[in-house]
Amino acid sequence: MTDNKAISRETLESMLKAINMGVLLVDHDCKVLFSNHFMSINSGRSAEELVGRTLFEVFPELPEVWTRQKINSVVTLQNFAFTSWQQRPHLFNFESTRPISGLVGHMYQNCTFFPVQDADGGSLGVGLAISDTTDTAARQLELTHLNELLEEEKSAQALLIARLEEAQAQLLQSEKMAAIGQLAAGVAHEINNPIGFVCSNVNSLRRYLVDLFALLDAYEQASDEKHAQAHPELAAMRDKADYDFMRQDIDELIVESVEGLDRVTRIVKDLREFSHVDSYEWQLADLHKGLDSTLNVIWNEIKFKAQVIKRYGDIEPIECMGSQINQVFLNLLINASHAVGVDGEIIINSGREDGGVFVEVVDNGHGIPLDIQNRIFEPFFTTKPVGMGSGLGLSLSYSIIVKHHGRLTVESEPGRGSCFRAWLPLRQPQVQAHATSAVEGC
Ligand SMILES: Nc1ncnc2c1ncn2[C@@H]1O[C@H](COP(=O)(O)OP(=O)(O)O)[C@@H](O)[C@H]1O
Ligand SMILES: [Mg+2]
């Protein structure tokens, strides 16, 4: 232990003056009684200039009301008070030079207010101990900043994960759809054969019935009154069977059955064309057939909403993956049917252009606002209510067309309608060698 009495007042004062933190002593009126070197160096004023004047004259940046309150409370309660750089970063307007970069900035400070008594134990005033916390503050602020960046990255990752999960769900869904498509195509394939022979049998039956009725007519004409009297049971049988009605009805039944069979044949054909299980490879395909089968598949969805006008041009078969191009047509047509209101109209144009072919789906719907026209091809971008749109139709279509070395573009006028245009080359550059020569519908 050091003996306090051995240290002179001058020694203590010179220590206070030299210490590497600010020391001030003020009286109850905030008049400066003592100020050390730290305060002079940082304020640019000598101790003589500071002492004898109020804090607010020499340090105008100090908040007067707040400072007086602090000093009064320390005097009254004879307690310590503290303010940290987080609450008041720059209490005194001092500068600080960073050791490595040499950059000059505001000094961050902590300040302790402590009661000071005179030799008789009476209250002399309040001491202020000001420490430079710029290093700590700089590190802390940098950490906070890094933390914020990490948080931002974390939420960006969370968003990404959510999107990935959604994409995976979508992928599963499309795999499911593909499986259903294959199943449908398989069933369609299986039905194709029996439907074929039922059709042919019904047609034969129809011919036989014509002959059979002709034969019956001939019998009727040949039989005379005598013959009828000899065989009254024949007339009874005829009445019982309601022969005249049956004859007429058989004709109608046959006509209806042939119509029904035609419809089944068409549905089976459309299903096979649309799902095109055998076309997951590049083939020459007739786009008009693809458009027609796609239209048939979604006809129920479209027929009450819009009138469909086909303006097919003269185009030749192109090398493509039929089922994928049909998927594009499906997305464009469904979007168009979602966009139209009363008096909806969807026009399908096709033609040759630029050494390739184009297909346009034009609607007279609500159109696309200018500010979102460049976003509609983004995955998950949708303006439709939850459950109505996944926002994947156009992005999927875009990637299919790009994979085909084509272009998918849009022109739209809000309030008047939209035109989606797919342009496709006649042949694929890298797969030319594998193209089959068979011409297939999409
Ligand atoms: N024919 C169209 N008319 C107006 N807006 C359209 C049309 N086609 C697409 N859009 C806009 O583009 C968005 C994205 O379309 P899409 O990728 O097919 O996703 P979804 O149909 O699931 O919303 C739609 O939500 C819609 O705002
Ligand atoms: Mg869509």
Image: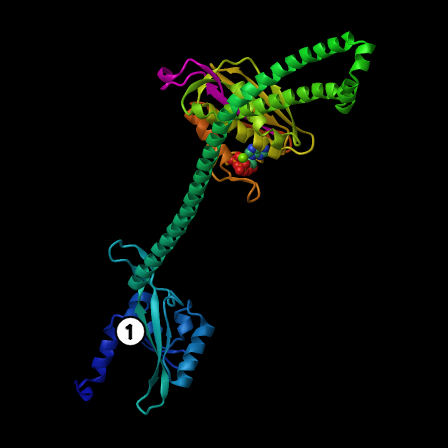
Residue 275 drawn above or below residue 369: above
Nearest the viewer among 137 and 5 is 137
Q: Give the magenta range.
A: 418-442
Question: In the rendered picture of this protein, how many numbered marks are placed on residues?
Answer: 1
Q: Is residue 368 above or below residue 209?
A: below
Foreground of the two, 331 or 143: 331
Residue 86, position as x, y percentages in the image? 38, 66
Residue appearing at x 54%, y 39% in the figure? 389
Crowd class of label 1 (few under 14; some 14 to 19; many from 20; radius 10 Å) = many
Q: Is residue 279 magenta?
A: no
**Residue 231 coordinates in the image, percent (x, y):** 78, 16
Q: Which corner quadrant holds the N terminus?
A: bottom left
The image quadrant where one finds ligand 2 is top right
Query: Which residue is pictured at 40% across the width and 68% down the height?
Result: 87
Q: Residue at x 29, y 66 (%)?
A: 41
Q: Quadrant of residue 414?
A: top right
Q: Where does the image place residue 199, in percent across and percent down from the top left?
A: 58, 19
> In this figure, which residue is indicated by the disc labeled 1?
36
Q: Is residue 239 left or right of residue 172?
A: right
Image quadrant where residue 248 sits: top right
Towards the viewer: 221 or 302: 221
The image shows residue 181 at horizontal and vertical percentages of 48, 31
Q: Amino acid at mark 1?
A: Asn
